[in-house]
Amino acid sequence: MSEWLYTSDLHGQSALYEQLLATVAAHRPAVAIIGGDLAPHSGGADGIQRQRVFLEGFLVEFARRVREASPATSLLLMMGNDDWAANHGSLERRDGDLWRLLHDRVVSVGGVAVAGLSWVPITPGGLKDWERWDDGAPETPVRLDGWASRGGARAPYVFDPDRREPTIAAALDDLARRTAAGETVWVTHSPPRATRCDMIGARVHVGSRAIRAFAERHQPPLVLSGHIHESPRISGAWRDAIGATVVVNPGQFGTDRLCGVRFDPSRPGETLRHTVHG
């Protein structure tokens, strides 16, 4: 049995990273995955620099400690919608060394293909780097304006409702051309729409229609997500199914106790276990 570990939405909280390290040391998983929102929330004018300090300091040291605690564990990670894209180069510089990046990539670990996508549907938040139109169909986002940093600096950004592209659907289709989609483990920061994994406090579903349609069409064994921290608490479940596809959102509940899942990638439906540290 090969055990993998998945969590998401640590948002720079040192206590959660320490608990992730302790879990890796205790269980020695073959793979540990962080599915987005790596850095502390930093939305102001100095947000990019503050997150860069975290990624190039704390996160690098964390990854080194993971390697010391469990040398055989592969660390996979990607940014989420609360991480400034201007700092992606800080992650790229350590790719293949301390970790392997997942966004818009397919990586193979122990013969298992893993594909990742950081994009989320447009949110009410102000950081727009990792937001996209969902599937090209009409949408009514609460907030179209905000800030983006893909040019290297924080700058105003506004989505054009008359031009609903590029889309999450297109990004998924592009990735699917690089892997056997129905045999791949998918890590998508956004959960699929209309599951028990995408429910906010108002009991409204806010996940991605494109990711749901993709899962319905390709039926991969597993979709690992996050983004909607409270969903397991609101819906009462951290997993759901879309046909033969198991969908997971372990949640993070605003406490200093890490939520995650452990599983055997060859039998995810049978082996998935939700864990809350402590």
Image: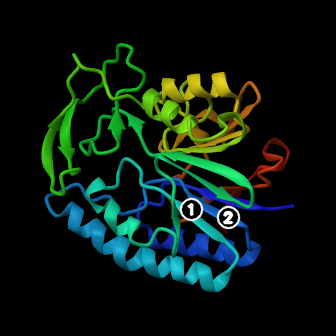
At mark 1, the secondary structure is: strand
Q: Is residue 187 left or right of residue 31?
A: left
Q: Which mark is residue 139?
A: none
Q: Residues within 10 Å of mark 2 (few under 14, many from 20)?
A: many
Q: Alpha-carbon distance for marks 1 and 2?
A: 7 Å
Depth check: give the residue in front, 274 or 46.
46
User: Tags 1 and 2 in contact by the CB under 8 Å rule?
Assistant: yes
Residue 99 against residue 11 in the figure, above or below: below
Between 44 and 128, the residue placed more toward the observer is: 128
Image quadrant in which the N terminus is located:
bottom right
Where, by quadrant of the figure, is residue 46 drawn?
A: bottom left
Q: Quadrant of residue 67?
A: bottom right
Count residues near mark 1 (Cα–Cα under 10 Å), then give few for <14, some for 14-19, many for 20+: many
Residue 263: image location, x then y, percent: 77, 54
Instruction: Determine if residue 99 is in view.
Output: yes
Q: Is residue 151 above or below residue 214?
A: below
Q: Quadrant of the C terminus?
A: bottom right
- Residue 75 sits above or below residue 154 on the image: below
Q: Residue at x 51, y 54 (%)?
A: 102
Q: Which residue is mark 2?
A: 31
Residue depicted at x 38% and y 63%: 39
Q: Secondary structure at mark 2?
A: strand
Instruction: Tell me, yes or no, if residue 229 can be seen here.
Output: no
Q: Is residue 275 left or right of residue 9?
A: right
Q: Which mark is residue 76?
A: 1
- Return the disc, 1 or 2, that comes first in the chain's sequence: 2
